[in-house]
């Protein structure tokens, strides 16, 4: 854990990147929520950037028709990583934030059902594989070239955002405290249009057929990958190592099968499979 301290710190049982501080995270408890606020909550690598882009396309016509050039991070900033020290009270309404926070560290008002939360989950094996590749690409994470070691850290929750199971379990079992919509990466892959309509419905947004078509078209993996804003290509070199990957990597379901050995798969199932069966919500992904 010594080396990891350079990258992560623990606050109330949860690992954060050192890009934020315990004091800032603690202050979020009192963060004021507007009824129109929307939070995209995820465990890392579950489809955050995808959902950020979908929301930008749904909410901002200028984003949809290409008349506005704004970086995703500017439009939908990270709640707990306010690296540019922006005054979030000044953001135009509706404000949309991304967060990896566990349910218990969210602003108090959100837990009183002000604002809305969209919580995205993904098959944890694909999450882990995506995370493994991402840690090579992003400078703020420790690069762990040995996949087996990365898997052990992931299973032990000794990674950014701690344990995948605790995160998902916590959000699911406290769903009643929030105005919340659960979406899976896999359902977005299977039928993006239905997922977009489900999100529109949750947000009370009525888009025309043509507008929905346009959102769906621009939110496909291929089209997002071509869009430098959607693919976070304008990040500086001290944040990402551009020769080692990209935010939009493969965008598939089941990529874990290309990297995990039979033994690693059995080990993963031994640790997580039974516990996943006890989650209070059944998701469409199946870890196998
Ligand atoms: P892979 O590494 O498996 O390709 P997050 O945004 O939470 O960090 O998640 C990143 C994962 O979502 C990456 O997975 C990325 O490729 C995938 N992703 C992003 N946009 C996508 C899209 N439009 N379609 C499918 N997958 C997408």
Image (tube, grey):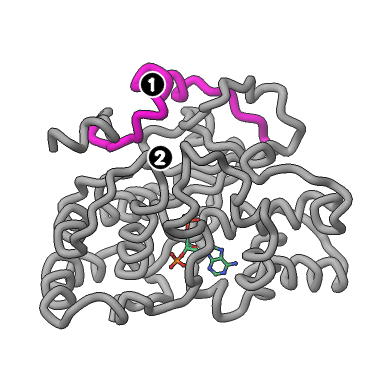
Residue 136, percent across and down?
35, 53
Which quadrant of the view contains residue 258?
A: bottom left
Q: Nearer the viewer, residue 221 or 122?
A: 221
Magenta-drawn stretch contains 87: no
Q: Nearer the viewer, residue 167 or 277?
A: 167
Dot 2 alpha-carbon crowd within 10 angstroms: few under 14, some 14 to 19, many 20 or more? many
Q: Is mark 2 within 8 Å of ligand 1?
A: no
Q: Residue at x 41, y 52 (%)?
A: 137
* Percent coordinates x, y for residue 176 in the rendering: 45, 48
Q: Total number of numbered labels?
A: 2
Residues in magenta, as a range: 13-35
Q: Residue at x 11, y 78 (%)?
A: 263
Q: Where is residue 192 drawn, in percent x and y?
A: 63, 74
Whether tag 1 and tag 2 are in contact, CB under 8 A, the answer is: no
Q: Residues within 10 Å of mark 1 (few under 14, many from 20)?
A: some
Looking at this view, is 172 or 78 the one in front? 78
Which residue is pictured at 48% across the width and 31% down the height?
Answer: 81
Question: Image check: 174 left or right of 56?
Answer: left
Callout 2 secondary element: loop
**Distance from label 1 to label 2 (Cα)?**
12 Å
Q: Which residue is mark 1?
A: 26
Question: Does the magenta segment cover residue 25?
Answer: yes
Check disc 2 and report the residue beneath it: 101
Q: Which residue is at 66% across, 37% downward?
A: 74
The numbered mark, 1 or 2, whose residue comes first in the sequence reads 1
Q: Position of residue 39 (x, y in %)?
A: 57, 43
Q: Quadrant of the N terminus?
A: top left
Question: Which quadrant of the structure image shows residue 189?
Answer: bottom right
* Left or right of residue 51: residue 251: left
Q: Residue furthest front?
A: 243
In this picture, residue 88 sits left or right of residue 259: right
Q: Secondary structure at mark 1?
A: helix
């Amino acid at each position: 854990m010594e080396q990891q301290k350079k990258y992560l710190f623990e606050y109330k049982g949860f690992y954060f990147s050192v890009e934020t501080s315990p004091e800032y995270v603690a202050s979020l408890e009192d963060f004021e929520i507007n009824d129109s606020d929307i939070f995209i909550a995820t465990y890392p690598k579950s489809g955050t950037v995808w959902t950020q882009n979908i929301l930008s396309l749904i909410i901002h016509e200028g984003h949809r028709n290409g008349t506005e050039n704004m970086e995703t991070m500017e439009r939908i900033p990270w709640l707990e990583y306010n690296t540019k020290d922006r005054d979030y009270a000044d953001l135009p309404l509706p404000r949309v934030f991304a967060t990896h926070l566990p349910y218990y560290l969210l602003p108090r008002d959100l837990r009183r059902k002000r604002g809305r939360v969209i919580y995205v989950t993904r098959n944890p094996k694909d999450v882990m594989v995506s995370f493994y590749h991402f840690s090579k690409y992003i400078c703020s994470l420790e690069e762990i070239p040995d996949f087996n070691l990365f898997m052990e850290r992931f299973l032990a929750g000794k990674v950014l955002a701690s344990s995948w199971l605790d995160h998902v379990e916590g959000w699911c079992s406290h769903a009643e405290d929030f105005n919340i919509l659960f979406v899976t990466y896999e359902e977005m892959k299977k039928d993006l249009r239905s997922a977009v309509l489900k999100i529109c419905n949750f947000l009370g947004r009525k888009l025309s057929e043509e507008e929905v078509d346009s959102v769906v078209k621009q939110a496909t993996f291929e089209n997002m990958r071509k869009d430098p804003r959607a693919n976070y290509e304008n990040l500086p070199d001290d944040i990402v190592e551009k020769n080692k990957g990209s935010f939009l990597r493969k965008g598939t379901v089941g990529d874990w099968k290309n990297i995990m050995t039979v033994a690693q798969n059995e080990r993963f199932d031994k640790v997580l499979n039974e516990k996943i069966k006890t989650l209070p919500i059944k998701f469409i992904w199946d870890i196998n």
